[in-house]
Image (tube, rainbow, N blue to C red):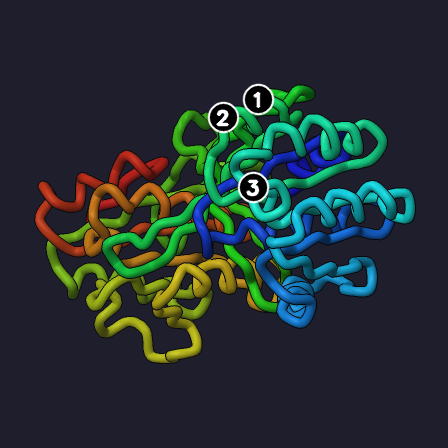
Amino acid sequence: MKEFVEVAARGMTLIYGPPGCGKTSVAMRLANRLEGRVMWVSTAEGPDLLVQVARRLGVDSSKFNFLDFPRAFQKDILRYILDHVGEYGVVVIDSVEGVAGRQNIDVATHSVLYQVSKEKPVILIAEEETPRLAYVADHVVHVWCRINKLGHMMRYIQLEKSRTRPPSPRYIFEIVEGAGIAYVYPSVTRGRSELLEDEDLGITAPALTAPAHSALCVHSESIKNMANYLSKIKEEAVYIKLGYWSPFHGVVKDERNMYVIKTTNDIFRLIHDVASGKIMPSYVVVGGLLNVPEEDRADYVTLFYALSGYVKFLLFVDVGPKTETEKLEKFCEDVVRV
């Protein structure tokens, strides 16, 4: 979030993407982090709904003046902005198409909104990529989403353009009730020379990050062998189940240590609980990556890697033929076969 806040603090920021992917939530969190009261001009949602969004995001709605304008009064909207903008520190337009219309969007952007942005931050929300608007904007943030093969919604965000810094990587994000918006940075695998030893697992593996963490693939062709191996750490581990089957049969007795992933939000809640110290496992054991289509695996690995900085080991475990399990090995620092 920090890099998005830094760019949005100056000039005009365009946030664009399809409906339902989180543009309004992203804009609200950004505006909340900027200095001064926020003029929020909406042509889509009423104030009551926006107050609910603020509450869900953990944002103080009193910082915002949510103004509801019918799209039919576009000229009045721009006039109102010019007459009252001096009372605010930030201006958010949701959406810019509703304020300016497709035919007049260039005129409104150049003659009014861009001029305002020279004095204070302006955030524009749009449902479509508008090349002319993106050209004028100082910063362009793309927000999009998709439903993957497991039926989970994945939300993505990327800084595509900025006059003050290079474009960002693509981040996965989620709206977590009571915790705001959580972002997960792209995973980093391999390439570490530091070694980490663990007597319970009987291995020595490259550490992922300092002081000492590592991601391992633990594979077997026998459920019994896997159960015996994982039983060594069962008191210190939490288990994450993806899909309908997992290799934890006979290991996990306490359901409180099992996290069944039904939505992407479930993963982010677990990340939040571990990062905040609500739960403090030494190991996170992920089972079921073989249930995930290959085109979706990297997203889940990126999410699970966010846990690696808080535990001794992140384990990707699966039972199956070597020709299948070796497909996961590119995500691991080392591989253990049991």
Residue type highlighted by circle 1? Tyr
Q: Is residue 295 above or below residue 199?
A: above
Q: Identify the residue shown where x is 32% and y is 54%.
A: 147
Q: CA distance from mark 1 to mark 3?
A: 17 Å
Tag shown at residue 112: none
State the mark number for residue 101.
3
Q: Residue at x 54, y 59 (%)?
A: 175
**Left or right placement of residue 243 versus residue 55 in this view:** left
**Any part of residue 266 in sight:** yes
Foreground pick, 98 / 75: 75
- The 10 Å Cα crowd at callout 2, few under 14, some 14 to 19, many 20 or more, is few
x then y, percent, for residue 311: 51, 53
**Real-space CA distance between mark 2 and mark 3, rounded to the nearest whole angstrom:** 15 Å
Q: Is tag 1's residue or tag 3's residue first in the polypeptide sequence?
A: 3
Q: Nearer the viewer, mark 2 or mark 3?
A: 3
* Residue 187 against residue 164 in the figure, above or below: below
Mark number displayed over residue 131: 2
